[in-house]
Image (cartoon, rainbow, N blue to C red):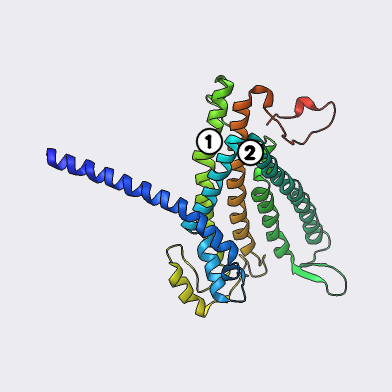
Amino acid sequence: MQDTGSASFGQIISALGEGVAWFGLNILSAFSNFAYAVFNPSLWLDWSNKEAIMRFVYYGGSVEFFFVAFTAFLVVTAIGLWKNSVLWFVVRAFEGLANTLGRFFAWAGLLMVLQQIIIVFMQRIFTRPDIVFGFGVPLQFDISWYAEELKFYNALVVTLCATYTFVQGGHVRVDLLYASVSYRTKKIIDMCGSILFMMPIAVMVWMYGWYFMWRHLIVPKPSASDTLDRLLTKSRALRWNIETIGFSPNGFTAYFLFKILLVAFAGLVFIHAIAFFYRSYLEMKEGPESEGKYLDRDTLGEGEEAYEGTH
């Protein structure tokens, strides 16, 4: 029994050692992989070449790409620990990206309401089966097409405004412990939340959404289990096959856009997880007086302060 226990313990130690070695090797390889991609862009960006498309598909959801992004995070963090202004620059850039996208695509909510009003008028008052927009060469679709398109507007708001809402403090938070702990503990909780929850979930959604998206754009359909060599072999028969089938005969025909938005959502969440981690660290280090530093939040105007920050 003792020999069996010792053997099992040794196997665990050996497996851990192999895992650490694999992790470290991938981090070191990230530098060469990044340099190779930068200095050979035609291998994955020249989409007139079918093999380049397949390389783009493979590397976009690959371990190599993850470690390039993760290593970049480690490098920026190391530099920022030495010079905090670098981290503040990253925070302002990433939060600015979230605010810019969110403020722009939030208008999709207004378009959704206006289009729904038009649909009701056309159906109930004018009893028309279709809606025509434009001059010369009009854009004409069945009313059911426009009705299903409302889902796309909703998807724009959900996916591209999620990080904007986070910056603005608009997401609902269930507080069981947070409010009662010290300022420093709050920032540690925020840092752990961004590393242990936001980043891993964003990576998983990206890994699933990346191949889910490409399976509705090209054939032969790629798979997450395909090796690069297998995808390059498939590239000989590659052709674009963009999804244009709606849920109803005359319904919305651009459902592939939802797959693209899913990938964009995962990328934005991962980016903002980095910004939130850096902000939490910097606010913890600099103290309560730095809380909200450089934070660009919308305001309802003078005299409406009591209604701001209440969610």
Q: Residue at x 59, y 56 (%)?
A: 263
**x, y percentage for residue 22?**
38, 51
Which residue is denoted by mark 1 in the rendering? 193
Q: Is residue 8 left or right of residue 99?
A: left
Q: Is residue 95 left or right of residue 126?
A: left
Query: Quick one: SS at disc 2?
Result: helix
Name the residue rendered at 65%, 39% in the picture: 86
Among numbered discs 2 and 1, the one appearing first in the sequence? 2
Left or right of 162 on screen, residue 111 = right
Mark 1 crowdedness (10 Å alpha carbons): few <14, some 14-19, many ≥20: some
Determine the CA span between mark 2 and mark 1: 18 Å
How far across and how far down the image is residue 178, in percent? 55, 25
Q: Residue furthest right?
A: 135
Q: The residue under label 1 is which amino acid type? A: Gly
Q: Position of residue 173 (x, y in %)?
A: 59, 32
Q: Does the image show residue 166?
A: no
Check if mark 2's residue and mark 1's residue have beta carbons within 8 Å. Answer: no
Which of 302/243 is in front? 302
- Residue 17 appears in the picture as rendered: yes
For image coordinates 72% across by 34% down, the residue present is 294
Badge 2 is on which residue? 87
User: Nearest the camera: 153 or 248?
Assistant: 153
Q: Is residue 50 above or below residue 280?
A: below
Under tag 1, what secondary structure?
Answer: helix
> With respect to residue 72, does 139 lie above or below?
below
Q: Amino acid at mark 2?
A: Leu
When the figure is inspected, residue 268 is found, relative to residue 250, above or below; the finding is above
* Mark toward the viewer: 2 or 1: 2
Residue located farthest toward the front when viewing the structure as drawn = 82
